Image (cartoon, rainbow, N blue to C red):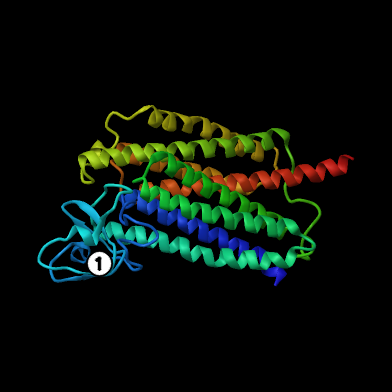
């Protein structure tokens, strides 16, 4: 069981990235408010498939907690309701958390699948926490990190509810995204220390495969920080685009970046700094023969990020580019963080040799 722990952590990491993918599709399609409530959707555990299910009508039955749209306003059934010929306000409570009262079947089910992916990701996470308990005596760090991820995951769920309740408030969305990246970082660290633990793997080697270089190590740290800043700023830019979509309509994509604000220009220009830092990593890795294979993947993802960013701006958001842009950015952050762990391990090894 203990030997399988790193594999379980890896599965959990993949599950978290599936949440990123689902979330990016939600943002790409503007489906963030597809379900006006949380954790249910219009009061249903399985979302409605037709507008008539959430529209008030005479001589119909609605269960307690169900949400309807009437006169562009959301109402919640205070108890099981059997409607008559007229709308009785005594049976319904106005939904006051926000005033978004629209139904779009595609948006609703896109958001529902996003929530479902989060719920499914909780399965390997819970198993990971249970497995980690067996390490309590000899490796308390495994248990503590696993529990930390679970707590953050629950915090993320609460943030998801807050995102809906505040009608996609930009600050909450940014915190939601950054918290997700923190979860990825903790999981990657847990995988790194568990997969390199002597007690778990007989194939572990004392000598790291990579060489240590001081400048390279410092640039890796800078690259991680820069990516975190860029992703956080990207969520703000995306919110500006969402506001433009609300104003001009989803079909008028050419207005999405009409008169962009400072955050957009900072996000775009900051890419230059990120490219320089990461190409610096690539150059040092090649010239010094450090052996960090992850650098090649980082450069590829950086290229993908840049290309999708250019396409979104100049080609009016081709389908899929926003999802690829967000997912590539989150994976890029993860690879950079893991690269830092590898560099840190090499540094510790060479310090021991010097001493």
Foreground residue among 59 and 54: 59
Foreground residue among 289 and 308: 308
Name the residue located 87 percent from the left edge and 39 percent from the top edge.
354
Q: Secondary structure at mark 1?
A: loop
Residue 132 position within the rendered picture, expressed as x and y whole percent measured from the top left: 68, 64
Count of marks overlaid on the render: 1
Foreground residue among 184 and 340: 184
Residue closest to the far left: 85
Residue closest to the far right: 355
Look at the image and tell me in which quarter the C terminus lies: top right
Foreground residue among 350 and 115: 115
Name the residue located 47 percent from the left edge and 30 percent from the top edge.
270
Residue holding disc 1: 49
Residue 176 position within the rendered picture, expressed as x and y whole percent measured from the top left: 47, 47
Image position of 321 (left or right of 330) = left
Name the residue located 52 percent from the left edge and 49 percent from the top edge.
180
- Tell me if residue 177 comes above or below residue 91 in the rendering: above
Look at the image and tell me in which quarter the N terminus lies: bottom right
Residue closest to the far top: 262
Question: To which quarter of the image does residue 256 belong?
Answer: top left
Name the residue located 66 percent from the left edge and 46 percent from the top edge.
292
Image position of 146 (left or right of 165) = right
Q: Is residue 291 in view?
A: no
Residue 310 position within the rendered picture, expressed as x and y whole percent measured from the top left: 37, 38
Question: To which quarter of the image does residue 219 belong?
Answer: top right
Q: Is residue 59 in view?
A: yes
Question: To which quarter of the image does residue 63 belong?
Answer: bottom left
Image position of 240 (left or right of 253) = right
Image position of 3 (left or right of 299) = right
| Within-10-Å neighbours for mark 1: few <14, some 14–19, many 20+ | some
Residue 340 position within the rendered picture, expressed as x and y whole percent measured from the top left: 66, 43
């Amino acid at each position: 069981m203990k030997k399988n722990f790193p594999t379980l952590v890896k599965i959990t990491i993949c599950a978290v990235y599936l949440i990123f993918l689902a979330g990016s599709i939600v943002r790409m399609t503007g489906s963030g408010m597809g379900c006006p409530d949380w954790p249910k959707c219009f009061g249903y555990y399985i979302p409605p498939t037709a507008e008539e299910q959430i529209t008030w009508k005479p001589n119909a039955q609605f269960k307690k907690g169900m949400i309807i749209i009437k006169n562009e306003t959301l109402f919640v059934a205070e108890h099981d309701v059997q409607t008559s010929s007229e709308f009785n306000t005594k049976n319904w409570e106005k939904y006051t958390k926000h005033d978004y009262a629209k139904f779009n079947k595609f948006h609703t089910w896109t958001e529902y699948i996003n929530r479902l992916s989060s719920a499914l990701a909780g399965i390997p996470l819970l198993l990971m926490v249970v497995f980690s308990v067996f390490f309590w005596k000899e490796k308390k760090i495994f248990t503590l990190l696993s529990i930390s991820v679970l707590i953050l995951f629950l915090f993320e769920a609460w943030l998801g509810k807050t995102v809906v309740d505040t009608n996609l408030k930009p600050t909450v969305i940014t915190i939601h995204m950054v918290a997700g990246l923190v979860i990825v970082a903790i999981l990657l660290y847990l995988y790194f220390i568990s997969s390199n633990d002597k007690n778990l793997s007989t194939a572990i080697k004392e000598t790291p495969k990579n060489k240590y270089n001081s400048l390279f190590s410092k640039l890796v740290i800078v690259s991680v920080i820069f990516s975190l800043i860029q992703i956080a700023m990207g969520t703000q830019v995306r919110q500006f685009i969402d506001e433009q979509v609300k104003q001009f309509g989803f079909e008028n994509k050419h207005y999405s970046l009409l008169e962009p604000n400072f955050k957009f220009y900072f996000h775009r220009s900051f890419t230059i700094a990120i490219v320089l830092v990461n190409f610096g990593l690539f150059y040092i890795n090649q010239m010094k023969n450090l052996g960090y294979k992850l650098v090649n993947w980082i450069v590829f993802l950086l290229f993908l990020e840049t290309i999708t960013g250019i396409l979104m701006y100049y080609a009016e958001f081709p389908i899929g580019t926003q999802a690829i842009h967000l997912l590539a950015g989150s994976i890029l952050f993860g690879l950079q963080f893991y690269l830092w762990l590898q560099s840190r391990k090499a540094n510790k090894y060479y310090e021991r040799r010097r001493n």
